Structure formats: C-alpha cells, structure tokens
C-alpha cells in the first residue's frame, strides 16, 4: 500500500480545513459536555439518591450506537453541524459526569469542614475549594472525552459532516488508500496534540500538585 505524496501536497489546503472543522466539532462537544456535566455532578455529589439515576442515565445514552444517535437527531436538527455536536456531546457526558463526581468525592471532608467553619458560603466552598481540588480528576475525564470525541467525529460522515471522516469515504469509494491513510494520521495527530495541550493546561491550573510532587 503506497501513499501518493503528490495528492497530499496538492490538497494541503483542503486537509487543513477538514482538520480544523474536525477539531472544532470535537472541542465544541467537550465544552457543551462540561457545561452540562458540572452542575449535574454537583447535584449527584450532594444528593446521593440522584447519583445512581444520573450516572445510570449517562451510561444508557453511551450504549446507543453513534450512527443511531445521529439518525435520531436528524428530524430535530437536520443535516447540520448541530447534529454532530449534539451527538458527540451525549457521548462525552458519561466520562465527564463520572469523573467530576469522583473528583468531588475525592476532596477531603475535613478540608470542606474547615472552609465552612471559617464562614465560607457553600457556593464559595464549591468554587474555591472543592472544584480546584477535584480538578486533576476532572481534567483526566476531559482528556479522555476529548480524544474520544475526536475519534467519533468521523462517524458523522454518514450525515454529510464528519471532518476528516470525509477522507475515509472518498478513499473507499475510489479504492484510493492515500486519503484514508491521511485521514487516520491526521485524526491521530489531532488527538495527540489536544491531549498534550490539556496536560499543559492542567499543569498550569494545578500548581499545588507540582509542589507536592
């Protein structure tokens, strides 16, 4: 199996555009997943009877085949990027919700009690004590969700989107391996770069972990 490097050079601009579109869809899904999972995780952490319900619901949504999710969303949002982002957001919830709950659970009770004893209001305790201490576990979930979303964007090719997934369709239809190999390589590269960037962000946001180490 050979690669046509001439084809790659001639389509450099298209490959860049597809890569940016691919990354935009994945990162949008992770962002919306965080916005949804953070308040739900706080509820699951504080109201124990709801924990099993929320985590179980996210697990059920995760078991739905990705193509089926996109197809079910078509009557609502049509053949648009919105359908792609909604579908990917659903899949990020199971990771983001569970990791956020586990992160909040990992905060020492004595630390929260000390903050409360100093007169700190519950919301401020959450924002200045619990979430910062839970951040390493939350960021681990964000990294997993980001890599997962980047890998799943290609499935949206079946609804006319899919970013780099369009290269797979093009290569298979023409029995031309170069677009397929290029799409796989660029998807892997995007996942590695995104993960490295998130590691750097976590390094900056959690200076106390470096001091402890």
Image (tube, rainbow, N blue to C red):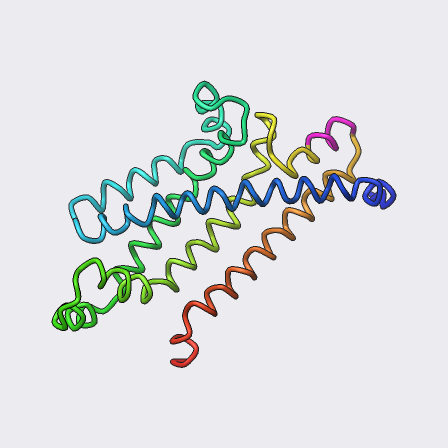
Left or right: residue 204 compared with residue 6? left
Q: Main secondary structure of the magenta part?
A: helix
Residue 51 locus on image (x, y percent): 22, 46
Q: Is residue 193 above or below residue 208?
A: above
Q: Residue at x 33, y 65 (%)?
A: 132
Left or right: residue 30 compared with residue 117? right
Total tally of numbered discs in the picture: 0
Q: Residue at x 51, y 33 (%)?
A: 84
Segment colored magenta: 169-174
Image-quadrant location for residue 14: top right
Q: Residue at x 55, y 60 (%)?
A: 197
Q: Is residue 46 above or below residue 6?
A: below
Work out which quarter of the rendered image holds the C terminus and state it: bottom left
Residue 45 locus on image (x, y percent): 22, 53
Image-quadrant location for residue 60: top left
Work out which quarter of the rendered image holds the N terminus and state it: top right
Residue 196 locus on image (x, y percent): 56, 61
Find out whether residue 39 is within the magenta segment: no
Residue 49 locus on image (x, y percent): 15, 45
Q: Residue at x 56, y 31 (%)?
A: 156
Pick whichever, 88 or 18, lies toward us: 18
Which residue sits furthest right? 6
Left or right: residue 149 compared with residue 93? right
Find out whether residue 173 is within the magenta segment: yes
């Amino acid at each position: 199996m050979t690669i046509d490097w001439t084809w790659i050079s001639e389509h450099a601009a298209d490959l860049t555009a597809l890569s940016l579109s691919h990354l935009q869809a994945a990162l949008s899904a992770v962002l919306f997943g965080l916005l949804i999972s953070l308040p739900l995780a706080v509820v699951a952490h504080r109201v124990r009877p709801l924990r099993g319900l929320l985590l179980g619901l996210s697990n059920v949504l995760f078991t739905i085949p990705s193509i089926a999710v996109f197809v079910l969303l078509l009557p609502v949002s049509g053949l648009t990027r919105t359908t792609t982002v909604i579908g990917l957001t659903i899949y990020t919830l199971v990771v983001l919700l569970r990791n956020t709950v586990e992160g909040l659970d990992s905060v020492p009770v004595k630390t929260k009690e000390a903050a409360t004893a100093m007169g700190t209001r519950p919301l401020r305790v959450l924002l200045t004590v619990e979430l910062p201490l839970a951040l390493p576990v939350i960021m681990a979930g964000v990294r997993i969700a980001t890599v997962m979303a980047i890998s799943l964007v290609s499935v949206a090719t079946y609804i006319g989107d899919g970013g780099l997934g369009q290269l797979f369709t093009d290569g298979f239809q023409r029995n031309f391996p170069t677009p397929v190999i290029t799409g796989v390589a660029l998807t892997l590269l995007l996942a590695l770069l995104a993960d490295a960037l998130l590691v750097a962000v976590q390094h900056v946001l959690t200076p106390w972990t470096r001091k402890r180490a």
